[in-house]
Image (spheres, rainbow, N blue to C red):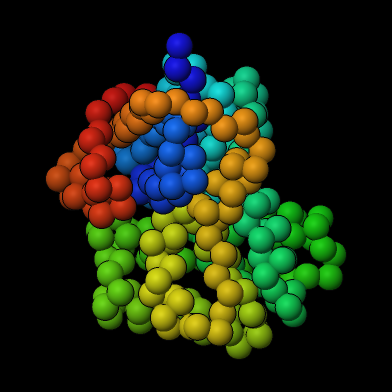
Amino acid sequence: MKSYIGVFDSGLGGLTCVRELIKQMPHENVVFLADNKNVPYGSKTREEIRVFTYNNTNFLNRFDLKALIVACNTSESNARDIIEENVNVPVYGVIRPAVKAALKASQNKKIGLFATSMTVRSGKYETTLKELDEKAQIFAIECPELVPMIENGRFGNDDQVMKETLKGYIEPLLEEGIDTLILGCTHYDVLMDILNDMYPQLKIVSSSRCVIDEVFNELNIKEDKEPERKYFTTDLDRRFDKVSKMIIKDIEYEKVDV
Ligand code: DGL
């Protein structure tokens, strides 16, 4: 019987984790859920995020899971306790691996954070950073425009509107003297190339990639010759399908209620 690595997010962000997972662990079976009906989580209430998170873990529990990746900073920062209570397999969150990688990358320990409103307001990045290095500082900014823009496919390297939006978010952090920026929302991974082009001096850490590095290091890698990949979504339209294919070329979704 096949066992799967379960992954969930509100939408496309989770696909950036799955893309990295497939790259680093091509033989693993993967089951992914996008709760696209409820995106964006970042502007919902904490109670709503907790209900969505509970429903997502319940859905993934239908599969024989070997591990669960919380590919959503907003869910992790507002509902990690619910996830831990509701699943019986190791849970991998995005926040701690991203903070560790940022501390390793930063020289001056002034670290910027781009995240959704509800991730920033949870204070989880700050407490995790202080646990690992008391003297390090985090400069967080809520980026409510980014998820809707990314869901609309606006992440090409020549997208001027995206560039202007990013400038508006990053300038105050650069004024604080940050040398490292955490992309604390899995959706933002698709902005890596634009940001590297715009700010080559900045070290950019993607929460999507860091969690997969951790899973790769900790999990017993399986060699399944015909790995299965299942992709579910709670809402499916042509736009979501098209933008998903910009991240994972051959993706085919099944629509489900959770
Ligand atoms: N990709 C998610 C995160 O990492 C959620 C974004 C959203 O739905 O607002 O926070």
Q: Position of residue 225 (x, y in %)?
A: 40, 26
Task: From this view, report whether residue 193 is shown above or below residue 73.
Answer: below
In the rendered image, the quadrant that contains the N terminus is top left
Residue in front for this viewpoint, 71 or 247: 247
Q: In the image as oriented, which residue stretches furthest toward the left? A: 238
Up/down of 104 relative to 46, above or below: below
Residue lying at 64% horizontally and 80% vertically, measured from the top left: 178
Q: Position of residue 106 (x, y in %)?
A: 69, 73
User: For this rendering, which residue is in front, 111 or 97?
Assistant: 97
Q: Hey, which residue is sitting farthest right in the picture?
A: 134
The location of residue 170, given as percent across then percent down, is: 51, 79
As drawn, is 141 to the left or to the right of 145? right
- Residue at 31% x, 38% y is 37
Quadrant in the rendering for residue 188: bottom left
Indicate left or right for 158 with 199 as reference: left
Please say if 198 is above or below 230: below
- Which residue is at a point 35% across and 48% down the rendered structure image? 12
| Residue 224 visible in the snapshot | yes
Q: Nearer the viewer, residue 33 or 157?
A: 157
In the visual, does 7 lie left or right of 103? left
- Observer-nearest of 65 and 222: 222
Pick the quarter of the image with the C terminus. Answer: top left
| Residue 45 visible | no
